[in-house]
Structures are given as structure tokens and as C-alpha cells.
Amino acid sequence: MTSRWVALVLSVVAGVALCAVPATAASATPASAAAAPVVGCTFTPTPDNPAARPVVQPLPFALTRGTVDVTFHFNYGPVTVRLDRAGAAPCGVANMVSLVMQHFYDRSQCWRLSDSERLGVLQCGDLYEVEKGGPGYKFPDEVSGAETYERGTIAMGNQGPGTNGSEFFIVHSFAHIPAQYSVLGKVVRGMDAIDRMVKDGIIPTDPDGPLDGAPKHPVKIATASFGR
């Protein structure tokens, strides 16, 4: 483990001890997040889909207060997202913090970009290709059913209910999709960089279908770090 990872473990454990909140393996809900400074999380290994890079599985609980800024350093420029621990998806936020701390997203590529009437998102976090190359574990959705996906929203992507891992998407226009994806926070800097990605175009998966496929100009994440 790196010293930063050890520090995170110790700080979270200390917070749990002080608050006398047990680290139970239960999925988070908005109600529990509002009632306690930590909430239990369930992270389940996926032996049939092993980790694309070696990572330590997140701790089975998450902080539910405050925010944390993460900057993705794209080849188009930096994009900073503000992750909301007090929102509906504290386990999702804790997961992304863990992956950023372990450099999982460094030297990765965003394989999907869409700009259709229904969906306008940049999808990242899969290391091999679209929906392939995750962290070797999954965790439940954290949704209330009232989620909306406006421009600038960052949310978990998945391959079906309860299959969250490392995949995420950023909404560059709008996303008219069901409230089935855990919302992590909002972009606070760098939407102009994402707009340039969209402007450079898309190679559609289906030439006769909507604009949904690989970016014409590869979109890459050099590093992901905390702060701006």
C-alpha cells in the first residue's frame, strides 16, 4: 500500500471508532447517509471478470459528509469533478476516491462518446474497451428513482443492476435515461474540454444509427488526481 492509501484507511477507521458506527456490509441509502457520518457498503469480488490492474478493494464503509474534488487530466485539458459524499451515492464516491488514490484511471482511454437526441455522454473507466476492464469487484446501485442527468453530471456506468465498478460517464448535454445510475457529483471546471471532444466528432458503432461510438480523436486520461 502507498502511504496515502494507508492514511486514508487510518482516518476512516478512526472516524468510525469515534462515532461508534459498525462497518456493516450493507448497501447505502439516502436515508442512512443523512443519519450517520458513515454508511456500510458492499463490494463483491468478480472472479469471472478479474481486475484490469491490481487494486485493493475499498473498505466496506463510506463517509457521508463533505465533498472531494478529482481532476481528470485529459489530452484535451483538465476536467475537475466535485464528488458529493453527502449525496445519494456515498459508496460510489468512496469507490472513485479509492481508484483515483490507487492510480487506476491513469493512462486510460475513454472508449465511448454519444451525441444523440436521447443521450449525450462521455463514458470512461473501462481499461480495455467499452464495458471491459474493471477493478475486479462490483457494488450495488445507489439510486432513489428521482435522479436526473443534466449537463455536467458525473455518474456511475454499469452493465446492469448492481454491476458498478470503475466505469463512469459525464453528461455533456443531457441524458434522457431511467434513474438507474448512481450520481456522484458535478463537473466544476473543464466542460469546455469535453465540448471540444464532442466537436471533434464520433465514429458511430452503427453507421445508420445515432451518433454513439468511439471518439474520432482518441480521448485519453493521463492521470487522475485530487484537487484542482
Image (spheres, rainbow, N blue to C red):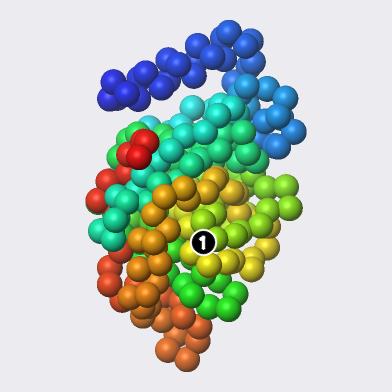
In the displayed structure, would residue 33 be above or below residue 70? above
User: Which image quarter is the C terminus in?
Assistant: top left
Residue 22 spot, x, y in % from top left: 63, 17
Q: Which residue appears farthest toward the top when viewing the image?
A: 18
Asked whether the viewer can see residue 34, the reply is: yes
User: Which image quarter is the N terminus in?
Assistant: top left
Task: Residue type at mark 1: give it.
Answer: Val
At a point 39% along the width and 72% down the height, the residue shown is 198
Residue 75 spot, x, y in % from top left: 25, 58
Asked whether the viewer can see residue 214, the reply is: no
Mark 1 residue crowding within 10 angstroms, few (<14) / some (14–19) / many (20+): many
Residue 94 spot, x, y in % from top left: 50, 34
Residue 136 spot, x, y in % from top left: 41, 44
At a point 67% along the width and 30% down the height, the residue shown is 33
Residue 197 is left or right of residue 16, and the answer is left
Residue 121 is left or right of residue 77, and the answer is right
Quick one: SS at disc 1? strand
Instruction: Return the residue at label 1.
Output: 171
At a point 67% along the width and 48% down the height, the residue shown is 143
In the displayed structure, would residue 133 be above or below residue 197? above
Observer-nearest residue: 97 or 68?
A: 68
At a point 60% along the width and 54% down the height, the residue shown is 181
Q: How many marks?
A: 1
Residue 31 occupies which quadrant of the picture? Answer: top right
Residue 25 is left or right of residue 101, and the answer is right
